[in-house]
Image (cartoon, rainbow, N blue to C red):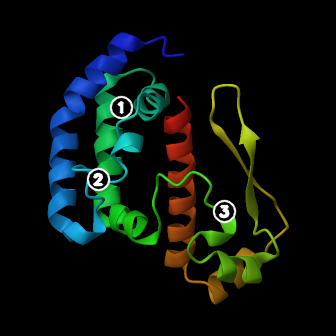
Amino acid sequence: MFEKCNELKELRKELQMDLDGYASWMSLSLPSSELESEVETPATAPMLLSDVRMYRFLQGNGYDVSAAATAFRKMLEWRKSNNIEKDLVSHFNLYEMELKQSNLPNAKEINLASGSNGPWYDAGRTHDGHVVHIEVIGSGDPSAMIETVSEQKIIQHHVISRAREGNKIVANS
């Protein structure tokens, strides 16, 4: 699957200090009761450090290790500034693979505002294991949903949903 293994190793090596720093930041920013006791790094570390994630950054940046590392650092900074890990840890155990879509945070509000299934759903996976995520045009009214449910709650719902799917991919790879 990973044709560009040398680039993957280079990217991992270049990002190691950033990932170590991010893990340290996570352990300082979350109260210890919110972290799983047997996990010293963030709860999302397996997903963040997976070959699948690194390879996607390489693919998305034309196998340019420097550009992929820059994009990865921007993603880490975004996660840090938006407290993504704190939201993930506080809402559910990421390692629970059978979490239903309806149990995700804000799902009830989003479904009420946008229709029974919301304007998006997961249709399955590609042969490489990537989630096929479909947004049904016309099935929901985004303006009405934003009026009813805050943009922050929609983003939180979407990010946690993607994190859950990301962990399923990592667990199965």
First in sequence, mark 2 or 3: give its number: 2
* Residue placed furthest toward the bottom: 148
Q: Badge 3 local density, few (<14 within 10 Å), some, or many (20+)?
A: few
Amino acid type at image mark 2: Pro
Residue 118: image location, x then y, percent: 75, 69
Residue 108 percent coordinates (x, y) = 68, 80
At x 44%, y 35%, the residue is 53
**Tag 1: amino acid:** Ala
Judging depth in this view, the residue of 117 and 147 nearest the camera is 117
Quadrant of res 161: bottom right
In this picture, residue 166 sits left or right of residue 54: right
Disc 3 to disc 1, C-alpha distance: 33 Å
Q: Amino acid at mark 3?
A: Lys
- Is residue 19 visible in the rendered image? The answer is yes
Residue 20 spot, x, y in % from top left:
17, 42
* Position of 146 relative to 130 (above/below): below
Q: Residue at x 66, y 83 (%)?
A: 109
Q: Residue furthest right?
A: 138
Residue shown at the point (41%, 20%) measured from the top left: 63
- Residue in front for this viewpoint, 100 or 37: 37
| Circle 3 SS class | loop
Q: Is residue 6 left or right of residue 18?
A: right
Q: Is residue 30 visible?
A: no
C-alpha separation, residue under disc 2 versus residue under disc 1: 22 Å
Name the secondary structure under disc 2: loop
Q: Which mark is residue 68?
A: 1
Classify residue 58 as left or right of residue 111: left
Q: Which residue is mark 3?
A: 100
Question: Which residue corresponds to mark 2?
Answer: 42
